[in-house]
Amino acid sequence: MNLRSRLLIMGCFAISFQIIALFAFFYYYVNPKFAKLEKTLVEKNLHRGLELLQRELFHLERISQLLAQEPTISQVVNDPNNKPIPIEQLQNNMLGLEINLICILDASRKVIWEQILDLNTERPYPKQAILTSLWEKKPSFFEHTSKFSVQAGIFNSKLGPMLVVSAPISPTNSPQVTGTLIVARLITQDVIHLIQSLSYTDVKLWPLGGSTLSAKQLSIIQKLQKSDSDYRIEQSGSIFRGYMMLQDLNQQPNLLISTTQPREITKTIALSLSEVAFIFLGLQILFLIALYLLIRSTFLVPARQLILQLNAKNKDWRPLNIDAKPWNEMGLLASTISNVITRYQDRLSHETTLAYREGCQQTRSILIQELEETLKPVVDGIEIAEKKLSNLPTNDIEWIIAESKTGKLTIKRITEYSERLQIINDKIRHFQKESRHRLYDLYSKTLRNIASIRSESRSLDSVREFTPINSKDKITITRS
């Protein structure tokens, strides 16, 4: 695997690792934190809705106290038979103050006047046993020990959940309680819309004993009753839904309040993180491409040029030419390789010179030895021939020649001359035959020695191939 493939694999691995790391960071760290933040918003929305309901109840308490202090109502309670009840004025007060129910009771808890109005149609509702239900629910709701003992709470009637306030009726300058004023406001859709607009939430209310509760809401109610917390948050798709139970006059669960919170923060953050992740990954890819081009221009291309020059045949390596600055790492590497090659070539030249000289010296000694072996039989043959020639009967021949010049040749002398000549002739023939054998043997040895000398001289060709450049020692070998 080459360096380019390794860089590509490392880049893909780095990008994959960053994607996994970003996903793990968002899924295991960022997402739980924003989920907790959104749950906190749901909890705050629940408490905000509850606080607005409590404010409405507090506002109704103030209205009830003001109504209870009106002279008209005090006169109705103190003298109900002598003076007619101002029904029209009370109804106008109910419409103006957005009150659905007003009940006036005297000190003996006898109902003097009761009215339930529909604020939308401005008409009274049918007769309802609301006071009886209130008495059954909480009898102490009608008892007041002082003129400041105001009681309030939430009550589920047949008309729906309502805010109920019980205020004492007493004269302005007297601390005595002469009656009870019951004021109620139905928690209608208009009130819920008002709470939603003030709290910027989608608060909803359900009576706990109502028929509109679903199986899931009943399950939520059971879980809230078993839980130590006063609220519960559940996730439904991309929405967090919070539930809380409101207490009635007896501090018992009475209403189920709920609100939702879309996971827009998580979606926005996820989208933002996705955009940031794509931008980051794009920058990483551009960075890797730039890094690859930088490595390619500063390392890969010079390295390939260096490899091609080192693998080139019949080329001098000094100097190595690559596309790199001399002070760059690749330039320094090429310079170092050139210096190493130069030292290696110098060392090789020195060793080759020594080997060449030793080969030439050894060849000289071998040639001298072969020449000595070749010439020694010739010298020995010449010496032997000289000895043989010196042993010829030259005196007898000279005597015969001298006797023949005297002219005194007899038959006896001729016979003696013939015998001596015959002996001389035999010796000469024997010497001739022996000389021929010696010359043939000498000729054979000479041919063998010449062949050996030629083979030794041919071995110098391998030595010439390693002749150092610009060598001053040149040896010329002449072959005959």
Image (spheres, rainbow, N blue to C red):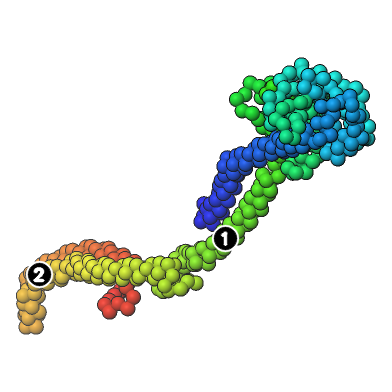
Q: Which mark is residue 287?
A: 1
Against 83, residue 355 (above or below) is below
Q: Residue furthest top?
A: 136
Q: Nearer the viewer, residue 436 or 95?
A: 95
Amino acid identity at mark 1: Phe
Mark 1 closeness class: few <14, some 14–19, many ≥20 residues within 10 Å: few
Q: Is residue 293 left or right of residue 54?
A: left
Task: Mark 2: give few (<14), some (14-19) or many (20+) Cα within 10 Å.
Answer: few
What's the residue at 56%, 53% (across, down)? 11
| Residue at the spot 80% in from the left edge and 31% down from the top edge | 74
**Closer to us: 50 or 361:** 50
Which is more foreground, mark 2 or mark 1? 1
Residue 356 image offset from top left, x and y in percent:
27, 69
Residue 76 image point, x, y percent: 85, 29
Q: Of callouts 2 and 1, which one flags the residue occurring earlier in the amino acid sequence?
A: 1
| Residue holding disc 2 | 387
Question: Could you tell me the amino acid type at mark 2?
Answer: Lys
